């Protein structure tokens, strides 16, 4: 993986290759069909990302360590007419 981040305030860019960070994406769901025409489904989606600090040795410009975690539960009802 190649990362290139541009700091627009001082026109310096930070780059690295294979930073060793992680991304996770999980998706799960379960459903039930009540009748031939009517059903319901419950799903959950999870995303997680970790990025370690990105900096240039001897410079004040850096991108701090950050973690993003997000989840999205969803309920779907369907009717086939």
Image (cartoon, helix red, strand yellow):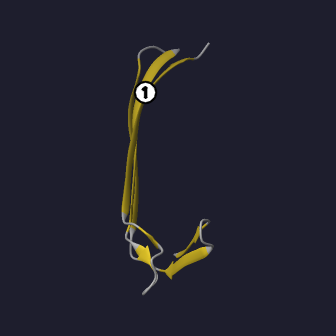
Tag 1, which secondary structure? strand
In which quadrant of the rendered view does residue 65 lie?
A: bottom left
- Choose between 23 and 36: the one closer to the eye: 23
Q: Quadrant of the C terminus?
A: top right
Q: Residues within 10 Å of mark 1 (few under 14, many from 20)?
A: some
Rendered view: 48 above or below 15: above
Rendered view: 72 above or below 22: above
Q: Position of residue 31 (x, y in %)?
A: 40, 28
Q: Position of residue 58 (x, y in %)?
A: 43, 87
Rendered view: 71 above or below 1: above
Marks counted in the figure total 1
- Choose between 59 and 78: the one closer to the eye: 59
At 41% from the left and 15% from the top, the residue drawn is: 34
At 43% from the left and 27% from the top, the residue drawn is: 41
Rendered view: 25 above or below 32: below
Q: Position of residue 37 (x, y in %)?
A: 53, 14
Furthest residue in direction bottom, as rendered: 58
Q: Position of residue 11 (x, y in %)?
A: 63, 73
Circle 1 residue = 41
């Amino acid at each position: 993986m190649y990362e290139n981040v541009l700091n627009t305030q001082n026109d310096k860019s930070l780059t690295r290759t294979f930073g060793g960070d992680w991304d996770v994406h999980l998706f799960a769901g379960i459903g039930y069909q009540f009748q031939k025409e009517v059903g319901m489904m419950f799903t959950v989606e999870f995303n997680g990302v970790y990025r370690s600090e990105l900096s240039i040795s001897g410079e004040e410009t850096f991108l701090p360590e950050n973690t993003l975690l997000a989840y999205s539960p969803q309920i779907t009802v369907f009717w086939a007419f």
